[in-house]
Image (cartoon, helix red, strand yellow):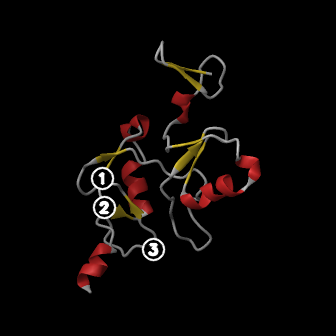
Amino acid sequence: MASLEEGLTCSVCRDVFSQALPLPCGHSFCPVCLRDAWGHGETEVRGCYTCVQCREEHGVVLCDCCPPVDAGGQTGTSTAVKTCLRCEVSLCAEHLQPHLDRPAFRTHLLVEPLGDLSHQRCPAHEEMFRYYCADERVYVC
């Protein structure tokens, strides 16, 4: 039983998870600890985050639609599974569902999660890049 509780405990704050954010390396942390660890500095600029436990770098993107505090008072933001280039938001599995179910979202382009969409926007026209020119090796709007 001790190993089960240990597996459900955040290695930073040592609290048992009410909501865990798993990283690709297999380690999980509570949202508050990840937000504290990743909230400031160059990790946000690079779009690359380091696991608090093993120091492995990951390109983790958090859901833009999850509230920082839910109705029950729990702090949490889920890991995004897709980014909608039309809505310009990154979405967790729960918030992605309307894009998959509703006909109004069928034309929206869903891509792997992107951290900073400002790099995906044309500086001259302020539109999202829509095409990639293979000859010039640049994105164009």
Residue type at tag 3? Ser
Q: Earlier in the sequence, mark 3 or mark 1?
A: 3
Question: Mark 3 touching mark 1, by CB under 8 A?
Answer: no
In the orientation shown, which residue stands out farthest toward the top? Answer: 136
Question: Mark 1 touching mark 2, by CB under 8 A?
Answer: yes
The residue at 55%/29% (across/down) is 120
Q: Earlier in the sequence, mark 1 or mark 2?
A: 2
Asked whether, in this view, residue 60 is left or right of residue 67, the answer is left
Mark nearest the camera among 3 and 2 is 2
Q: Quadrant of the N terminus?
A: bottom left
* Mark 3–mark 2 distance (CA, rounded to whole Å): 15 Å
The residue at 49%/51% (across/down) is 62
In the orientation shown, which residue stands out farthest toward the right? Answer: 104
Q: Is residue 66 above or below residue 7?
A: above
In the orientation shown, which residue stands out farthest toward the bottom? Answer: 1
Residue type at tag 1? Cys
Q: Which residue is mark 3?
A: 18
Q: Is residue 58 above or below residue 23?
A: above
Image coordinates for residue 134, horizontal then vertical, percent: 48, 18
Q: Which residue is mark 2?
A: 27
What SS does tag 1 mark? loop
Residue type at tag 2? His
Image coordinates for residue 50, horizontal then vertical, percent: 31, 48
Q: Earlier in the sequence, mark 3 or mark 2?
A: 3
Query: Neighbour class for label 1 at 10 Å: few (<14), some, many (≥20)?
Result: many
Q: Which residue is mark 1?
A: 51
